[in-house]
């Protein structure tokens, strides 16, 4: 009987002894073992200069997470996927960060093909990297995944832009199999908060045989999640002055008004998700060994997700409310409807079906080739409900806003009644690619084997589109507030996109790349890769990569690589703008009213150019990595990998340049209605460096039992290029404001970039399986985080609050209750650990939303699987 690894298990960490785990019952964990990845001209298991960490589809499922990005954040210590709150669309489409850098520095592939990015621009809630637009990995069903390969070396030379932090390749299932179904239900049971967050998930997979040797693998999934809430009670006046509840540490001690508490939402929003994916392969011709024949393939999917998240509560007595519409105030809700479509189709010969383009099959002579075309799109329609437009007055039935002349019934009336739901616009991102890859072995008679050569070319079209919101979401109806003042214009708390901000923008690009792997000596492999890429709007760039692998014996190997990379500004960064317009009392002329604008201006907007915005340059990067793998005994393996990456001219959203910040800013904005201006800029230079390590041990206990132990950890830091003795000063100055050294990315942002995520994470795990029974126990440990606060308005930020290290324990049990039926019960965060309590805003927001561990508390779940195991 072979020593089969336990393939269904947790990947968690804890800061406690493995012996304690075993005494507690020993967990069944599928330790995800890093292994040497194949060169782009070889299958995954082939010796090469890069390291790829591989997780099976079972590993992903057994995290207990229902979202792919959440599962990967459990499996990868260097991943960061916090649950940001009150962040507009970012609350539903959260950015996934790897190795401390931006979400758009990680390239995501599906079956070796580039995945398109989300249309969402993370202007809020992106933490240290505002303005990023990464890939929405939660648009793929978990059950469709055969394995996940995470490349630790820089991949920009091989795969192109966005691969600065690494490459995540999602390999889809491609086998014929009987139908499999999974149904799960889970619920949060925290000790100090109400039980909430009911979630249920249904998915199925079926691998159908097609023709002679073909396969059509289908996966469908549906999930529904109810919201969680960890907000404290609001101790402010609500309906009238003096009616505030008496509140202590977020709890109502004495009630004085009719407003139910908590009136804010601080937790996960409501979400429903439908996904359908397919993977098709059909041999068209057979080679002698059955692997070198031509093959037709196609894969892709459709998903639709509805996310509902809340903004800050608006009290009844607030001038942004009309009590006749919302007598007790209102909690604005975002309703994001995300639709994602992808399709890849192509022909290949001599490339392994599960190794992707550029991975040449073993055996056979001559050229191998892969020709493909693909399309991907992501659209997000954005609505607001449970809100209103204060400037349209208290009328829901008939229009009563007077227009600019202040007199109802005249020609300038907007003619729009107020409402509680608005369509605020939509965002679209489209990508179209054509790829050609060829490769072959060349016998030279030198070295320890043939040269492995790969060549490729790509043509790519990108487009980005912004659609306007309905007029009621952005109009100023000129109705005074309930107290007689100037009303805010537009839907609260997100106004619709204005017509001048809308449009559709395009970019074309092409690239050429080549790679050579040369086994000079039997233990030594050298690899060289080059790439030229040219973009229609920002020009071209030449990048390269060198790597080596030295095999000291069958049980030890060393790998190292150095590479350069280039990432152009995303179309969304070059074109995105969202500005709120309104009226205010003129500060220079008492009694006079003037118009103002505030928000994010596109880099080519006159207001942004006036304060120093310039056309965006591409980001350039340099990366080095090195790793060592050791397998000194059967079942025992240790790996350690270090990395360092520098990114020059990182693109970020600037701080607001506002009136009153300096005399020069006031002067530059004097000719505009702009009160505050943000824009995208090449704001800072970054350095990211760290170490990842993993240790696994497997042992068979008799004929029917197996034991596995594993430990892994990741340590990493990010540094901005700023003077070490002055965290309030950043290296990248606004050229237009150089005389006053006004910083477009200030010390608060730099400090948050460097300290806003844990420097380290670790996990220990253990697993025991015997026959039809498996039991598991594991945990995650999260290192300390810091936050920086200003002591007062206008002061330099210098108060540091430490978010302490935390540990979350997990457990699960599998039982095969009958042939083809498996029952799993498990729990996440069993001891109900929470991040350090900060009680911000009078205790309304008790936990920081950038906490790596989240703050939903204990989660218990059950899962029933039907099929062949």
Image: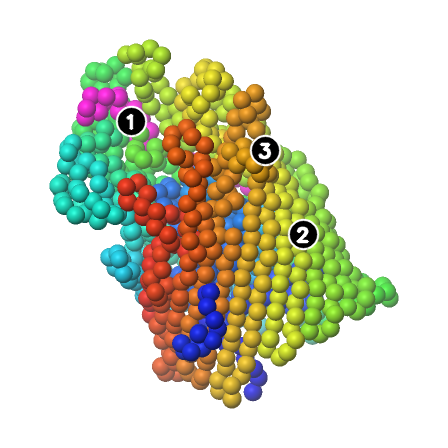
Using the image as rendered, state which of residue 58 and residue 244 is in the foreground: 244
Q: Position of residue 39 (x, y in %)?
A: 69, 61
Q: Position of residue 496 (x, y in %)?
A: 35, 33
Q: Position of residue 330 (x, y in %)?
A: 23, 39
Point out the tag, 1 or 2, that comes first from the N-terminus.
1
Point out the tag, 3 or 1, that comes first from the N-terminus.
1
Whole-number angstrom distance, CA of label 1 to CA of label 2:
52 Å
Q: Is residue 129 visible?
A: no
- The chief SS type of the magenta part is loop
Asked whether the beta carbons under mark 1 and mark 2 sit within 8 Å of each other, the answer is no
Check disc 1 and report the residue beneath it: 488
Provide the secondary structure element on which disc 2 rests.
strand
Instruction: Quadrant for the C terminus, please.
Output: bottom left
Q: Residue at x 69, y 73 (%)?
A: 555
Q: Nearer the viewer, mark 2 or mark 3?
A: 3
Q: Residue at x 47, y 71 (%)?
A: 17
Using the image as rendered, state which of residue 557 and residue 834 is in the foreground: 834
Q: Is residue 862 above or below residue 724?
A: below
Q: Residue at x 49, y 64 (%)?
A: 763
Point out the tag, 2 or 3, that comes first from the N-terminus.
2
Tally of marks: 3
Provide the secondary structure element on which disc 3 rests.
loop
Provide the secondary structure element on which disc 1 rests.
loop
Instruction: Find residue 624 and name its label.
Output: 2
> Residue 738 colored magenta?
no
Asked whether the beta carbons under mark 2 and mark 3 sit within 8 Å of each other, the answer is no
Q: Residues within 10 Å of mark 1 (few under 14, many from 20)?
A: many
Check disc 3 and report the residue beneath it: 731
Q: Residue at x 34, y 65 (%)?
A: 831
Which span of residues is magenta-colored? 462-488
């Amino acid at each position: 009987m072979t020593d089969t690894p336990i393939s269904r298990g947790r990947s968690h960490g804890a800061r406690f002894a493995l012996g304690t785990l075993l005494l507690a019952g020993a967990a069944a964990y599928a330790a995800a073992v890093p292994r040497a990845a194949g060169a782009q001209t070889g299958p995954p298991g082939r010796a090469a200069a890069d390291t790829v960490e591989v997780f099976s589809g079972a590993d992903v499922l057994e995290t207990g997470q229902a979202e792919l990005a959440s599962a990967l954040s459990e499996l990868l210590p260097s991943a960061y996927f916090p649950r940001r709150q009150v962040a507009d669309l970012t609350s539903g489409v959260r950015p996934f960060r790897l190795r401390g850098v931006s979400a758009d520095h990680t390239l995501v592939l599906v079956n070796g093909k580039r995945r398109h990015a989300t249309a969402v621009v993370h202007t809020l809630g992106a933490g240290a990297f505002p303005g990023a637009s990464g890939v929405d990995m939660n648009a793929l069903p978990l059950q469709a995944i055969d394995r996940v390969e995470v490349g630790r070396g820089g991949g920009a030379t091989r795969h192109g832009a966005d691969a600065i932090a690494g490459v995540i390749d999602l390999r889809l299932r491609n086998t014929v199999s009987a139908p499999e179904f999974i149904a799960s239900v889970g619920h949060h049971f925290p000790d100090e908060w109400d039980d909430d967050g009911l979630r249920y998930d249904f998915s199925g997979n079926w691998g159908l045989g097609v023709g002679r040797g073909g396969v059509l693998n289908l996966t469908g999934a549906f999930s529904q999640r109810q919201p969680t809430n960890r907000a404290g009670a609001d101790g402010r006046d609500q309906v009238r002055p003096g009616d505030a509840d008496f509140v202590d540490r977020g709890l109502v001690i004495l009630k004085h008004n009719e407003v139910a508490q908590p009136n804010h939402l601080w937790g996960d929003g409501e979400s429903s998700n439908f996904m359908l994916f397919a993977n098709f392969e059909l041999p068209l011709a057979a080679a002698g060994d059955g692997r070198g024949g031509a093959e037709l393939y196609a894969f892709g999917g459709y998903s639709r997700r509805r996310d509902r998240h809340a903004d800050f509560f608006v009290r009844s007595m607030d001038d942004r409310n009309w009590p006749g519409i919302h007598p007790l105030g209102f909690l604005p809700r975002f309703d994001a409807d995300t639709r994602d479509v992808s399709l890849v189709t192509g022909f290949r010969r001599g490339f392994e079906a599960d190794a992707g383009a550029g991975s040449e099959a073993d055996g056979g002579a001559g050229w191998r080739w892969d020709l493909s075309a693909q399309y991907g799109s992501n659209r997000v329609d954005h609505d607001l409900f449970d809100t209103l437009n204060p400037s349209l007055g208290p009328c829901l039935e008939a229009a009563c806003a007077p227009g600019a002349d202040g007199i109802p019934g005249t020609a300038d009336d907007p003619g729009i009644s107020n409402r509680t739901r608005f369509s605020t616009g939509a965002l679209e991102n489209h990508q179209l690619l054509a790829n050609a890859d060829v490769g072959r072995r060349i016998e030279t008679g030198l070295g320890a084997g043939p040269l492995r050569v790969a060549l490729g070319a790509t043509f790519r079209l990108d487009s980005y589109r912004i659609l306007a919101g309905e007029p009621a979401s952005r109009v100023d109806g000129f109705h005074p507030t309930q107290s007689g003042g100037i009303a805010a214009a537009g839907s609260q708390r997100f106004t619709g996109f204005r017509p001048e901000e809308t449009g559709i923008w395009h970019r074309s690009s092409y690239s050429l790349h080549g790679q050579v792997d040369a086994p000079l000596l039997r233990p030594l492999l050298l690899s060289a890769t080059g790439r030229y890429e040219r973009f229609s709007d920002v020009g071209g760039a030449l990048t390269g990569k060198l790597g080596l692998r030295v095999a000291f014996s069958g049980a030890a190997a060393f790998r190292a690589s150095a590479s350069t990379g280039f990432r152009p500004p995303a179309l969304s960064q070059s074109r995105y703008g969202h500005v709120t317009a309104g009226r205010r009392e003129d500060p220079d002329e008492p009694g006079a009213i003037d118009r103002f604008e505030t928000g994010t201006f596109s880099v080519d907007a006159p207001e942004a150019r006036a304060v120093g915005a310039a056309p965006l340059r591409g980001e350039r990067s340099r990366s080095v990595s090195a790793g060592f793998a050791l397998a000194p005994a059967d079942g025992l393996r240790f790996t350690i990998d270090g990395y360092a990456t520098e990114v020059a001219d990182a693109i970020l959203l600037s701080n607001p340049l506002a009136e009153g910040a300096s005399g020069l800013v006031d002067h530059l904005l004097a000719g505009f209605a702009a009160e505050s201006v943000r824009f995208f800029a090449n704001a800072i230079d970054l350095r990211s460096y760290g170490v990842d390590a993993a240790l696994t041990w497997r042992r068979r206990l008799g004929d029917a039992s197996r034991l596995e132990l594993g430990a892994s950890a990741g340590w990493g830091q990010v540094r901005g290029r700023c003077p070490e003795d002055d965290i309030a000063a950043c290296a990248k100055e606004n050229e237009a404001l150089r005389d006053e050294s006004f910083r477009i990315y200030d010390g608060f942002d730099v400090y948050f970039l460097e300290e806003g995520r844990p420097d380290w994470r670790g996990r220990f795990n253990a697993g025991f399986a015997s026959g039809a029974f498996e039991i598991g126990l594991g945990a995650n440990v999260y290192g300390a985080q810091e936050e920086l606060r200003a002591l007062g308005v206008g002061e330099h930020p210098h108060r540091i609050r430490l978010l302490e290290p935390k540990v979350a324990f997990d457990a699960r049990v599998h039982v095969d209750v009958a042939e083809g039926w498996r029952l799993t019960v498990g729990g996440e965060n069993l001891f109900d650990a929470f991040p350090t309590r900060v009680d911000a805003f009078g205790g309304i927001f008790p936990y920081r939303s950038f906490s790596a561990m989240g703050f939903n508390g204990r989660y218990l779940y059950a899962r029933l699987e039907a099929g062949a195991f």
